[in-house]
Image (cartoon, rainbow, N blue to C red):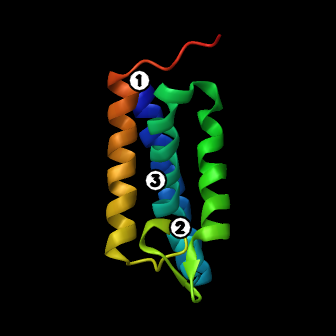
Amino acid sequence: MDAGLVLTVVAAAVLAGLVIGSLLDSPSALAVGRNTCFLVGLMLCARPLMGAPAVMAPVVWLLAVMLFGFGQGHPYFWSVLPRANGDPIALTAAAVALAGGLTCQLTLRPRAAS
């Protein structure tokens, strides 16, 4: 059931990004769905290791991208979020992160609070 809720929220974010991006002709809005998939997957992968504090993993990723994700004005391949909408590396990273996160959600137990 949790995986279904995750997919529902991610699908809603993708749909919202597509609608807003199409209506406003905004390339940034179109990237919302891809970036949401990546960040949700990242958080779900971190959850079995960190427990509830895993919700901060996307925030840490954003800070890392802002501080270290650019070289000579261009985003590094690992930064994912600032890359162009149709970038195959970013799309692949988002799909792998979401699939990995859902796999962790379904197979691993979160760390118990101590």
Front residue of 8/60: it is: 60
Quadrant in the picture for the N terminus: top left
- Spatial separation of the CA atoms under disc 3 and disc 1: 18 Å
Describe the element under mark 3 as helix, strand or loop: helix
Relative to 64, does residue 21 appear above or below in the rendering? Answer: below
Q: Position of residue 99 (x, y in %)?
A: 32, 44
- Gap in Å between the C-alphas at discs 2 and 3? 11 Å
Q: Which is more N-terminal, label 3 or label 2?
A: 3
**Residue topped by disc 3:** 37
Q: Using the image, tell me which numbered label, if any, was put on residue 81.
A: 2
Residue 23 percent coordinates (x, y) = 58, 78
First in residue order: circle 3 vs circle 1: 1
**Could you tell me which secondary element the residue under label 1 belongs to?**
loop
Question: Which residue occupies the extreme bottom position in the image?
Answer: 72
In the figure, residue 57 lies in which quadrant?
A: top right
Q: Amino acid at mark 3?
A: Cys
The residue at the point 39 percent across, 50 percent down is 97
Q: Give left or right: position of 24 versus 95.
A: right
Q: What is the number of the mark on residue 1?
A: 1
Q: Which label was assigned to residue 56?
A: none
Amino acid residing under circle 2: Leu
Type of amino acid under label 1: Met
Task: Please report contact status of discs 1 and 2: CB closer than 8 Å, yes or no.
Answer: no
Q: Is residue 29 visible?
A: yes
Q: Quadrant of the C terminus?
A: top right
10 Å neighbourhood of mark 2: few (<14), some, or many (≥20)? many
Label 1 vs 2, first from the N-terminus: 1
**Badge nearest the viewer, 2 or 3:** 2
Residue 107 image point, x, y percent: 32, 23
In whole angstroms, how far apart are the C-alphas of marks 1 and 2?
28 Å
